[in-house]
Image: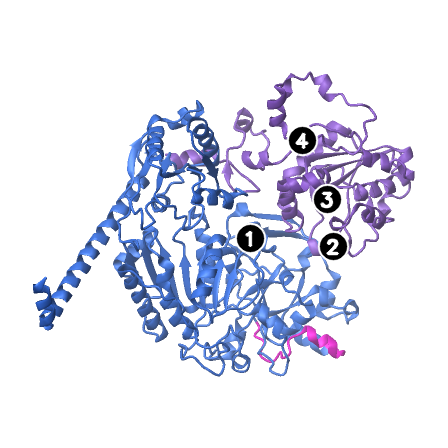
Chain colours: A blue, B purple
Amino acid sequence: MRFYPLQPQDCRQLKLLMNNPSQHQLLPHSLDDMPSNTIWLIPEKLVPLGFSSTPANSPFQTHFNQPQANAWPEIHLDFKPGKGTTIYCPRPNSNHSINQELKQYLNHRQLLLDELPFPLEEIHQHACHGYLTYEPGLMTKNGRPHCRRCGNHDPNLFASYHCYRCKQECTYCRSCIMMGKITSCSPLVRWLPNKREKRTAASPFTHPSQRHHQSNSELHSNPNHQSNSELIPNRKPDPKCDPSPRHTLAWTGTLSYFQQKASDKLYATINDFLHGKNERNTFLVWAVCGSGKTEMLFHGIESALNAGLHVLIATPRTDVVLELEPRLKAAFPNTKILPLYGGAEDRFGQGDLVISTTHQLLRFHNAFDLVIIDEVDAFPYTADQKLRYAVNKAKRDRSLTVFVTATPDGKMKWQAETGEILSVKVARRYHRHPLPVPRYKWVGQWKKKLAKATLPIPIFHWIQTHLTTQKQIFLFVPSVAVMHDVADILERTLQTTVGFVHSSDPDRREKVMAFRNGKTRVLVTTTILERGVTVKGVQVGVLGSEDRIFTESALVQISGRAGRSPDAPTGDVTFFHYGKTNEMVKAVRHIQEMNRLGDEELALESRKLREHNVKEQNNNPTGVARNLKK
Amino acid sequence: MGQWMELIRGTERCLWCDMFYEGNMGWGWVLGFSEHTHLCGQCENRLQRIKELSCLECGRPRLHLYGEEKVKQVEGVSENSTPFFQKKKLDHDSVCLDCERWQLVPPWDGVRFRHRALYVYDGFLQEVLARFKYREDVALAQLFGRDLRRLARRELGLFDFVVPIPLKGEREWERGFNQAEALAKGFPEVVPLLERVSMGEQKQSKRGREERIASLEGAFQLAELAGGGCLKGKRVLIVDDIYTTGATIRSAAGVLYAGGAAEVCAVTVARSVGKSSAGGQ
């Protein structure tokens, strides 16, 4: 869409020219403090046709007479960061009545005009009165396009075409196109935070006691300005404005020793954050696969919710959102929980606790105080960067980010070791058994064998041994093509049911269910399908673990599939390889290190217990007497 | 080492799944005249190319009930064992029921109309075209542009004009581009000979057959460009994205015939083959 960019002097001139009061709705309601380095945008669609007959020296006239591309220097909404021009946002006009529904839609979000089911006139009117602002969706950085919604800057993922809306070559982002197209001519609409409004209107999403802008002038001189002037909020729940009663935790289970430790530390960190005492704003929960991490988070989430924080749980996958939603709803019955994923019903709703996928998160802007990034079972790891970008955009300037992961990357590990970020390690599963350590098994040129429609003998041998002991088998392979071949071979040679499934399989859920029920004994797969696929006594094999896609984190995750159930806490994990890679070695060391840490802590715990018992016995002579009797 | 090999191998990037893949690396690639492919092998295989026709007029594909492989197993005869002349041979007036019905309506009892499509409109193609049309991913037009040109050349011959089906102004604004125009980019002779006059509120893709035909009465007219008898004796090719009942394309073709064109043909990316099979796949 084309916009008319008007300089301050143009705006003033135009205001004099307009005699019809309805036309005033195109311009900001006050022009008194419009700085000279700002511009004002008027959507082309809103400009009445009669405007072209205004006197010759009017700013519109020059635009209308030269409708060629070169006459629209700024229309592409393409602002170079160094240029110093920003879009003007007038001081909010308190006399103007706002559309609450529009506000609900836009609160803490950045949306495209096409996503808003409101007439453009109404939206622009809110812009005129200083309630919302347009921002460019696509920017050029160092001559390369950069999508401001999804953070994509890979030139391969941009394309350009002749656009009917702006009548010139237009670039768009192909990375986030499934959420609506971001082109160089489409603005993102953002609601401006406003002090006065916060006091009067209490939506469930905005807590009144938060975020006061100290100076308004600072705000409208620069709309992109991320205000650092937010006061440390006074985090006492305000009963008058809080629509829901205090959030209560209905979960009554008990935490294991390891879970309790992590939960306590998280609780303490959130408390520090509430009182503005925390010196770091990142917290890492390094928890091994299958350690029961959702339960660890409950107490922390409860205290944050009760303090009126907006809590977000971000995860790369829809499956995880669907799985977390009922669990959290059961745990927090009084809280409004908003699950967001592609195809969710209430995508523009509001909630105290938001569970979102990466993509849906991209629509948020400056919205959350506590962000929990749940990527424990995220695999493959490609969605990662996008998630980080989305989280950075969605969180507030003063916020706490909690990473919950089994495989932090090298940088984060290093930061945790040096104390640059706060962290806690959960080195044991909740059933207290150590993680199964993978074995290496060299199988030679398995690809050649596969071409001859057979598999290396050690694999057959391994599968046969486990099948005779009534165990189920997960076999991971590097690619879909290999998966089909392997499944064919196994089906032919084994007298058992063999299933195969990959991430974009339409019957994925049924196939996984069949495996979980035990109907399928061997499942050949390329990715970890679903979180918490807890099959009792499953054995895990990785064929071709030297492949590039099997990184350290992937291999650790894969190994974490075995021995999850407390009834069968051990399992066999085998890497069938043609040459050990560094990643494989690192993965095994990672698991061994975690087991060692767990042993140490268990030893410490039992020593403490013993000392505690001894003390008790000393204090309590009857107990000693009873013990002696025994 | 492995990573370097990947970099050398992954020369092209799939437009659908964004993965790097190995293009056709041969001497042609070295010398710089090999063609760019836009889909990786896996995505390419998911498209169902039309190989055999059951109707020579509207290009309806012949579909095997159980899929080709099963047919092979049952009959024990591979596809290649049928001699080529038997495979190609179709009755000259093998025309499907739909087209027979069309031939009763005035302009079509006198003139010939032929249509060919690249692919069967199945689940995957539906996904691709939905992203192309409704998500406005214009870059996907590259997938089909060149193949459409070749299909037209091979099956229908040479043309003087190529006409994309126009959109109504409002819808064009909504969509930001015209999908038929984007598909016709591969043709050198594109001339916008048609204009859209009227169109109901509803989208064509949400109507039944009768409604579609009824709604298209006088939907198109000749543009000023086509005035003055410049169409006389020329061959015109219409380009569009999907052929369902043929109502849109035939009404456009009717206008062109009325303008004096000698022959009008059409190519589309997808040929829909009835609700049962389109929904089932």
Residue A162 against residue A295 in the figure, above or below: above
Q: How far across and down, in percent of the image, does residue A90 sit?
A: 59, 76
Q: Which numbered circle lies on residue B180?
A: 3
Residue in the image at 63% along x and 83% along y: A95
Badge 1: few (under 14), some or many (20 or more) residues near its Cα, within 10 Å? some
* Label 2: element kind: helix
Q: Which residues are magenta?
A: A17-36
- Contact (CB < 8 A) between labels 1 and 4? no
- The residues tagged by marks 1 and 4 sit, at their Cα atoms, a distance apart of 38 Å
Residue in the image at 32% along x and 37% along y: A574
Which residue position holds label 1?
A: A176
Which residue position holds label 2?
A: B171
Q: Earlier in the sequence, mark 4 or mark 3?
A: 4
- The residues tagged by marks 2 and 1 sit, at their Cα atoms, a distance apart of 22 Å
Q: Earlier in the sequence, mark 2 or mark 3?
A: 2
- The residues tagged by marks 3 and 1 sit, at their Cα atoms, a distance apart of 23 Å
* Label 1: element kind: loop
Which residue position holds label 4?
A: B65
- The residues tagged by marks 2 and 4 sit, at their Cα atoms, a distance apart of 38 Å
Residue in the image at 52% along x and 60% along y: A340
Can residue B53 be seen in this snapshot?
yes
Say whether residue A16 is magenta. Answer: no
* Label 4: element kind: loop
Dot in front, 1 or 4: 4
Circle 2: residue type: Arg
